[in-house]
Amino acid sequence: MIDSHCHLNADAFAPDLEDVVRRAEDAGVAGILVPGIGLEESGRAIEIAERFEIVRAAVGIHPHEALQWGDDAERRIRSWASHPKVAAIGEIGLDFYRDWSPFDAQRTAFAAQLRLAKELDLPIVVHDREAHEEILSALEAPEHRGLRGVLHCFSGGPEEAQRAMDLGFHISFTGSLTYDRGRSDPILESVPLARLLLETDAPWMAPVPHRGKRNEPAFVTHVADALARKVKRSREEVLHATTAAAEQLFGFSKAPAH
C-alpha cells in the first residue's frame, strides 16, 4: 500500500525518523509521498527521499506559506523538480478556513504553481479548505486543462468530487474515515476505487485507535480498512486499486500491495 501524503519532514518525526519508516515498511507500506509546505520543508522532503528507498518527495508552497512565493521560490522549486525522486508539485492550493496568509497571496502562489506544474508536466497535490469552488474553477480553466493530481484530505461533497473526476483528478482520505460518522459515504458511493488514494497526513489526523496521538505512515492500514468497510469491498481490492493509482500518478515502483 502507499501513503500518498505524509509529512515525514515535520519536526515531530525528527527524533525517530528511521524507526517510523521501518514501522511503515513492517506494516506493508511500499511507498510514501512527502509533500513540501514551504521552501525549507521541500528541501527536507528531498533529503528524506534520498535516504529511504520507499520515499518520494513533492515540492511546493502551501497556502499558509504563500508569502514565500516569488522569483527565488520559483527558481528553487523549478530546480528541485528535476530531481529523480521528486514526483509532484505540492502541496499547493487555497485555505480560506484559517486566516494565516493573505488570500490574494494564496491565489498568486497557487496560480503560479499550477502554471509551473503544467510546464514541467508534473502532477499536483492540492490543499483545499473552504475553497472548493475557487480551486475547482481554477483547475477547470482552459489554461490548466490537462493537469493531473490529487485533492488531498478531501472535504468537498459529491458534486465537487465529480468535478474533480471529470478533470481526471484523484481524491484521497485520511484517518478521518475512521470517525467521520458517515460524512464521506455519499462521496464514496460515486467515486470508483481507481480514483481513490490512501493517506495519513501524518503527523496529524491520526485514525482510530490512535486518535489524539502522533500519526505515522504505518497507520495508513487503518485508513485502508475503513475505506474497505465503507465501499463494501475486500481489503485486498482496496489495496490493489489505491496502490496502482498512486504508482501511476506519482511514479512509485511496482510493489506488492500486501
Image: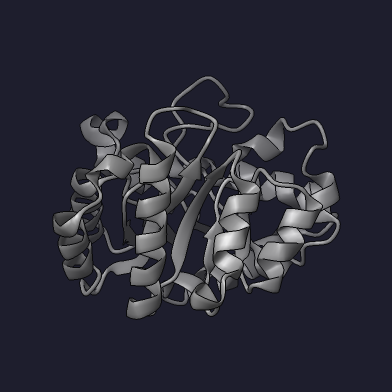
Residue 98 x, y percent position in the rendering: 48, 28
Residue 215 x, y percent position in the rendering: 47, 33
Image quadrant where one finds the N terminus: bottom right
* In this rendering, position of residue 23 left or right of residue 209: left
* In this rendering, position of residue 10 left or right of residue 158: left
Observer-nearest of 200 and 187: 187
Observer-nearest of 148 and 6: 148
From this view, report whether residue 77 is shown above or below residue 66.
below
Residue 59 x, y percent position in the rendering: 30, 58
* In this rendering, position of residue 39 left or right of residue 21: left
Q: Residue at x 34, y 59 (%)?
A: 58
From this view, report whether residue 129 is shown above or below residue 123.
above
Q: Residue at x 86, y 56 (%)?
A: 189
Residue 64 x, y percent position in the rendering: 37, 37
Observer-nearest of 227 and 120: 120
Q: Is residue 101 visible?
A: yes
